[in-house]
């Protein structure tokens, strides 16, 4: 299942790219800017600003959806039965269903639309959520993309079993691997995952001669300190065949989405990280012989 | 603009001149009007063309001339910077009517003194009934006048201001000089057969040409005299030298071909200036300046006569001079070209006639000097082609980043084959330039109005096709239709109704253009302009009489995207999905989406129908088919020059409708695409604002599905970018890469970039619905601006402000 296809993407790999955002992620990063990407099922999103109070959603499911005032509703997401039926119910698209099943051929059609623009190593980037948590169809897509000679990048946390990673090697041009933290405890408490799994997969992936770029999200209160980031850079520089590192500065673009999903943004009110704050990290990485980029 | 920081490489003198012109309030100059009136009064018995020659002569001989402190390029259009001359012979009715409001206009205001008002009232009184506007209206049928008054077809601009939209033959002017022209005219004049009626007319033409060119020479020499006398009083030795140099240049170029780059540039500017004293039309363009001036530059460079810095200074001075030229239009027409631009286009880049990259050092200097001045003039176009120098493209994106919309790109890969296909000789096709904004012509070989004849309001036509031909705004049935929408059984019925109506209106645009061209030919023949266009002199004809080598013109069709989106909405929601009924749709648009269910229907129309600009064949192909109905019909007609000399004499389609989308929308009720009554329609060929949600590549794909090779009047595409999108050179390369795909693979016609300003972001925050397509990208992440939280929006707004300063 996917939740977005974004054309003209210029920051997740070389050239101009189309990004396929898959729905579903094994991690729960507190700062996640695409919270709708976390669940593997449909997500009901409600943007109060666009609501005109037409009430069609209430007619469709008056148990789960109730009117609270002229231009507003309340959704009890726990008891919604079959969110699919709400998909096209709202004329103003205040209520939308995130998540759409697309066949491999449908995805290929969308990807091919921008193919004239994929010059200079552009192509498709598979992102998420976690693309490696997808089923068999996903591999079929990768095979067909390879058959059509479309450059594939994959953005992944590697927080999956090794088998899921291994089956993609040879089908993916470049893996853009998120390295969030090396510390086991911090990783566990902030993203509810196991950093060992990520690190082991990363080492195996490199041993398998896959092309890898490591990306570090720079998150205040989590890893945004010289000590922590430098530790990660040192780790990356010790890996053979990894010579590029990207820093993704924390931003708050996704905050509104939490509201529309009825979720709490628990990460608190932190300031966006400015490019200038990354300067010491960049210098350090370069001193270790790594190529750097901000924002990928 | 005034607060713009001076670039370190701009000299003090240039900056002072720039500030002076920018801070001068536009005003009105009555000198030309007085001279023309006097000559017309005294020479009532003379043919129009002689009267016009004498009037131009008197104006050039007697109008105020001045040289500003520090100016290197001289020549003024009127008694002051930015003072618009009055052209009473085109239209005067509007003057007494609008005079008292000129300084109170919400945009494009003009300062006018009480004395000037008095003078102009007198002048207007004498001209009443004698001018272009009166003649144009008189020779139209009542039906055509009604169509004009209903605002479905507008030709006000041509009838009040003339046509222009032309670039003259600067190659020839610079190679034979004004003296050369006099000789050539004399030679043809001697061969005139005065025993034939045509000979009599030719005799007048050559006489008028001679008078006008001699007057032009006198005008140039007046600057010589002035520069000399100023030099005598000058204390500053350096300035004294400059003034003597100016005097010397004027002496040379009044008669002979220029010898240096400086002289060639000065003569080029004089020609550009005098054409805009003679005629009232706008979009008088300079053609391929980096080509015809290059031999002079190269020569001076090799001999060490000129430096890059001084060349740049001369160019910058020229751009300031172009800005000091001004034009006043009636309010009705002003709204179609908001911001009062004169669209004096300069084209650079492109190919040589051998198909090689024509980019040279002067192309770079022109590009950078325009970037340094950041003015509205000239309008800078770059001719793109496959082999264009990539460093030059990168430099173009650096100028684009400055955020004043320049340069725009035209695409050789579609224009040149397109021109050859319609009958232009290959060598000429390779020499085309942009005219005005995006339209194209071969400089010095093309007649007027490669675009910009009448404006056709497509959405009014579309609405009439839903009401059995009734135009609800005027209450007139111009063309009985095929029935009412309420009775249609299928989408095919809707399309048939459109076919039926558009055929009629297409023909009427040609009828109106024919009347207008007939009046222009009779009332306001241009003499100097004809002299500088091939082959008017050998043929002994003005351009309007069929003097030019090529003649292709276009009107402008306004509301392209709305047409496609409306058709798609009806097809999908009414006939395919039956989400809304015919009656519901009619009630909704008639009530401007107010009342019960009105807004809900509008939301359905907005959100549940594919929109042009998102690379969706459903709507893109519907639009193409609907537009082709207009184009196929248009191809049946000829211009008034047919069989009179030029190659072509045909019409083609055009969408470079400048700011006409605002006033055109102001006369269109609500439409089935969800657009509210009297709000702007979409501009040019761009998607409707707020509807292209998939970014620039998808918009490129949609636009490229239009029948581009048949829209030689221009396929205008504006794209918005946030400054952060192209801050880094690597991002600029990505922009170049998509432009290359658009032009090389998709054969797009044109694109220009608006860098989103702080104002736009503020407006988007306040009015999200209109800006749903606005994508902002900061540090690797992109988002629709309107979906962001207010504080994040504020953060981006403050960054934008920062990055633009």
Image (cartoon, coloured by chain):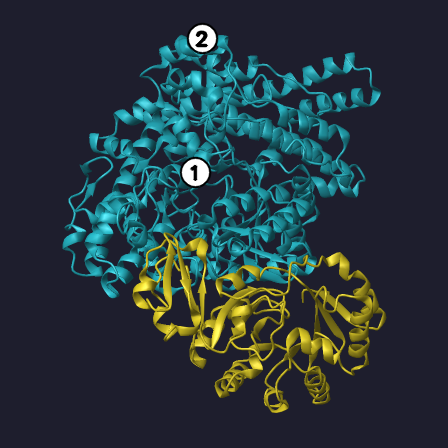
Q: Position of residue B612 (x, y in %)?
A: 39, 57
> Which residue occupies the foreground of this view, A99 or B396?
A99
Position of the C terminus of chain B, as image quadrant, is top right
> Which residue occupies the foreground of this view, B171 or B336?
B336
- Location of residue B253 by image quarter: top right
In the image: residue B81, left or right of residue B194: right
As drawn, the residue found furthest toward the right would be A287
Q: Secondary structure at mark 1?
A: loop
Position of the N terminus of chain B, as image quadrant, is top right
- What colour denotes chain A? yellow
From what the image shows, is residue B425 above or below residue B90?
below
Q: Position of residue B499 (x, y in %)?
A: 23, 52
Q: Position of residue A15 (x, y in %)?
A: 62, 67
From what the image shows, is residue B503 above or below residue B139?
below
Cβ atoms under marks 1 and 2 closer than 8 Å: no
In the image: residue B326, left or right of residue A98: right
- Classify mark 1: residues with Cα within 10 Å, few (<14), some (14-19) or many (20+): many
Report the Cα–Cα distance between label 1 and label 2: 37 Å
Q: Which residue is mark 2?
A: B118
Q: Secondary structure at mark 2?
A: helix
Q: Which residue is mark 1?
A: B447
Q: Position of residue B79 (x, y in %)?
A: 58, 16
In the image: residue B74, left or right of residue B749: right
In the image, the chain rendered in cyan is B
For the point 29% across and 51% down, the residue is B672
């Amino acid at each position: 299942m996917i939740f977005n296809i974004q054309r003209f993407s210029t920051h997740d790999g070389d050239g101009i790219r189309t990004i396929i955002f898959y729905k579903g992620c094994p991690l729960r990063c507190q700062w996640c800017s695409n919270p709708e990407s976390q669940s593997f099922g449909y997500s009901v999103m409600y943007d109060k600003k666009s609501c005109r109070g037409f009430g069609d959603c209430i007619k469709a499911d008056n148990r789960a959806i109730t009117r609270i005032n002229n231009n507003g509703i309340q959704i009890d997401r726990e008891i919604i039965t079959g969110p699919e039926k709400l998909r096209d119910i709202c004329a103003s698209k205040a209520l939308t269903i995130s998540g759409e099943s697309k066949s491999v051929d449908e995805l290929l059609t969308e990807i091919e639309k921008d193919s004239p623009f994929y010059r200079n190593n552009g192509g498709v980037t598979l992102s998420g959520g976690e693309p490696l948590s997808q089923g068999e169809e996903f591999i079929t897509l990768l095979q067909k993309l390879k058959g059509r000679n479309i450059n594939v990048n994959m953005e992944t946390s590697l927080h999956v079993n090794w088998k899921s990673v291994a089956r993609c090697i040879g089908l993916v041009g470049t893996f853009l691997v998120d390295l969030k933290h090396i510390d086991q405890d911090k990783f566990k408490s902030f993203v509810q995952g196991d950093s060992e799994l990520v690190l082991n997969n990363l080492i195996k992936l490199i041993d398998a001669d896959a092309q890898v770029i490591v990306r570090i999200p720079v998150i205040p209160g989590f890893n945004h300190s010289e000590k922590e980031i430098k530790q990660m850079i040192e780790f990356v520089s010790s890996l053979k065949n990894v010579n590029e590192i990207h820093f993704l500065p924390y931003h708050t673009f996704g905050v509104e989405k939490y509201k529309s999903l009825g979720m709490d943004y628990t990460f608190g009110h932190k300031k966006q990280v400015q490019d200038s704050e990354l300067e010491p990290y960049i210098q350090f990485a370069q001193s270790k012989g790594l190529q750097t980029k901000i924002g990928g | 603009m005034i607060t713009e920081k001076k670039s370190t490489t701009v000299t003090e003198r240039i900056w002072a001149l720039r500030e002076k012109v920018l801070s001068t309030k536009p005003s009105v100059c009555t000198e030309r009007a007085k001279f023309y009136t006097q000559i017309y009064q005294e020479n009532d018995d003379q043919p129009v063309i002689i009267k016009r020659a004498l009037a131009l002569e008197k104006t050039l001989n007697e109008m105020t001339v001045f040289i500003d402190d520090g100016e290197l390029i001289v020549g003024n259009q009127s008694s002051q910077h930015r003072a618009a001359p009055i052209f009473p012979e085109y239209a005067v009715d509007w003057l007494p009517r609008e005079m008292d409001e000129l300084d109170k206009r919400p945009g494009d205001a003009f300062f006018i003194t009480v004395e000037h008002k008095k003078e102009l009232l007198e002048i207007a009184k004498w001209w009443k009934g004698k001018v272009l506007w009166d003649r144009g209206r008189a020779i139209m049928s009542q039906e055509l006048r009604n169509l004009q008054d209903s605002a479905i077809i507008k030709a006000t601009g041509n009838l009040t201001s003339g046509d222009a939209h032309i670039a003259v033959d600067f190659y020839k002017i610079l190679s034979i000089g004004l003296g050369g022209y006099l000789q050539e005219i004399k030679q043809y004049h001697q061969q005139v057969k005065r025993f034939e009626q045509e000979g009599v007319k030719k005799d007048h033409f050559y006489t008028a040409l001679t008078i006008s060119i001699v007057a032009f020479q006198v005008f140039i020499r007046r600057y010589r005299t002035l520069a000399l006398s100023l030099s005598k009083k000058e204390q500053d030795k350096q300035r004294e030298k400059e003034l003597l140099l100016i005097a010397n240049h004027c002496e040379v170029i009044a008669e002979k071909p220029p010898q240096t780059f400086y002289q060639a540039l000065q003569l080029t500017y004089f020609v550009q200036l005098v054409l805009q004293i003679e005629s009232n039309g706008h979009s008088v363009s300079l053609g391929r300046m980096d080509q015809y001036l290059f031999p002079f530059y190269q020569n001076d460079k090799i001999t060490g006569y000129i430096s890059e810095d001084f060349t740049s200074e001369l160019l910058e001075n020229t751009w300031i001079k172009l800005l000091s030229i001004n034009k006043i239009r009636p309010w009705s027409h002003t709204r179609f070209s908001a911001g009062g631009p004169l669209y004096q286009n300069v084209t650079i880049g492109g190919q040589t006639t051998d198909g090689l990259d024509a980019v040279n050092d002067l192309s770079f200097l022109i590009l950078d000097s325009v970037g340094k001045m950041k003015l509205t003039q000239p309008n800078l176009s770059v001719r793109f082609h496959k082999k264009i120098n990539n460093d030059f493209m990168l430099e173009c994106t650096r100028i684009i980043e400055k955020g004043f919309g320049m340069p725009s790109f035209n695409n050789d890969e579609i224009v040149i084959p397109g021109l050859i296909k319609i009958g232009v000789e290959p060598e000429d096709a390779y020499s085309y330039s942009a005219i005005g904004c995006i339209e194209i012509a071969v400089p010095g070989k093309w007649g007027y109005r490669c675009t910009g004849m009448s404006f056709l309001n497509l959405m009014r036509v579309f609405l009439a096709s839903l009401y059995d031909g009734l135009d609800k705004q005027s209450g007139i049935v111009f063309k009985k239709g095929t029935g009412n929408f309420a009775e249609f059984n299928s989408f095919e019925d809707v399309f048939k109704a459109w076919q039926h109506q558009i055929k009629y209106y297409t023909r009427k645009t040609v009828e109106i253009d024919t009347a207008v061209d007939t009046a222009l030919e009779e009332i306001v023949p241009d003499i100097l302009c004809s002299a500088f266009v091939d082959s008017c002199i050998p043929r002994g004809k003005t351009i309007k009489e069929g003097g030019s080598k090529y003649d292709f013109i276009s009107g402008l069709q306004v509301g392209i995207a709305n047409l496609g989106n409306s058709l798609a909405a009806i097809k999908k929601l009414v006939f395919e999905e039956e989400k809304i009924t015919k009656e519901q749709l009619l009630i909704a648009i008639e009530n401007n989406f107010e009342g019960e269910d009105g807004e809900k229907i509008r939301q359905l129309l907005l959100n549940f129908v594919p929109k042009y600009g998102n690379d969706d064949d459903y709507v893109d192909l519907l639009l193409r088919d609907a537009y082709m109905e207009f184009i196929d019909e248009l191809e049946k007609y000829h211009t008034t020059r047919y069989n009179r000399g030029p190659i072509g004499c045909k019409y083609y389609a055009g969408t470079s409708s400048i700011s006409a989308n605002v006033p055109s929308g102001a006369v269109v009720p609500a439409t089935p695409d969800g657009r509210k009554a009297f709000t702007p329609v979409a501009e040019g060929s761009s998607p409707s604002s707020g509807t292209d949600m998939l970014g620039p590549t998808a918009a490129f794909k949609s636009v490229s599905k239009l029948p581009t090779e048949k829209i030689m009047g221009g396929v205008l595409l504006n794209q918005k970018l946030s400054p952060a999108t192209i801050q880094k050179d690597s991002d600029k390369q990505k922009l170049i890469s998509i432009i290359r795909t658009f032009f090389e693979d998709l054969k797009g016609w044109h694109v220009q970039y608006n860098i989103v300003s702080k104002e736009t972001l503020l407006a988007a925050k306040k009015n999200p619905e209109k800006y749903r397509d606005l994508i902002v990208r900061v540090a690797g992440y992109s988002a629709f601006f309107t979906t962001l939280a207010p504080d994040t929006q504020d953060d981006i707004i403050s960054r934008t402000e920062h990055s633009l300063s």
